[in-house]
Amino acid sequence: MIDERQALTAFAALAQETRLQIVRLLVQAGPEGMASGVLGSELGVSASTVSFHLKELDHAGLIQARREGRSIIYSAAYPALSGLIAFLMRDCCQGRPEVCTPAVASLSSCCNPLTEAGHA
């Protein structure tokens, strides 16, 4: 379970346009992830800029890296991102589940493969 200090670190990392774009690209890429060069190309930024932002996101625990041959592949740290969402929603209902229903429904529909494929 994520605590307030961890949430602040994660939100601080995401409060920068390029880093937010990187996380969104990595979420879209799925567990396969992307190489830093591909991220740079997608965002139109230099390798050193991507490297700087990847370091910040890694420090915040929002991404993970693995080596594949000569490349380092980055992917979203889904448990950390889920923990961040849970941190925000933890006290949502305050005894009133109808308050959280739209948010939960939104998360459920975004992560449903049939919905994503346009079959829902």
Image (cartoon, grey):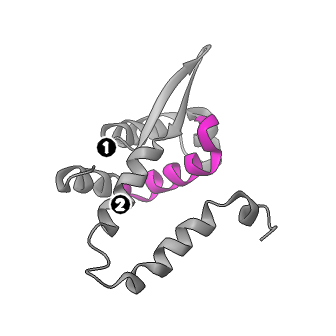
* Residue beneath disc 1: 60
Location of mark 2 (residue): 86
At which x and y percent is residue 106? 55, 73
Distance of mark 1 from mark 2, alpha carbons? Answer: 16 Å
Local crowd size for mark 2, using a 10 Å CA cut-off: few (<14), some (14–19), many (≥20)? some
The one nearer the camera, 95 or 82, is: 95
Q: Where in the figure is residue 87, as x and y percent of width and height?
A: 30, 61
Q: Which residues are magenta?
A: 14-34
Q: Amino acid at mark 2?
A: Ala
Neighbour class for label 1 at 10 Å: few (<14), some, many (≥20)?
some
Q: Secondary structure at mark 2?
A: helix
Q: Are marks 1 and 2 in contact (CB under 8 Å)?
A: no
Number of marks in picture = 2
Identity, as a three-letter code, of the amino acid under mark 1: Ala
Please tell me which residue lies in front, 45 or 42. 42
Where does residue 13 sit, x and y in percent of width and height? 33, 51
- The answer to whether residue 30 is magenta is yes
Residue at x-position 79% and y-position 61%:
117
Q: Is residue 17 visible?
A: yes
Q: Secondary structure at mark 1?
A: loop
Q: Residue at x 64, y 35 (%)?
A: 32
Between 91 and 70, the one lying in front of the other is 91
Magenta stretch containing residue 29, yes or no? yes
Magenta stretch, overall SS? helix
User: Which residue appears farthest toward the top when viewing the image?
Assistant: 69
- Which quadrant of the figure contains the C terminus? bottom right
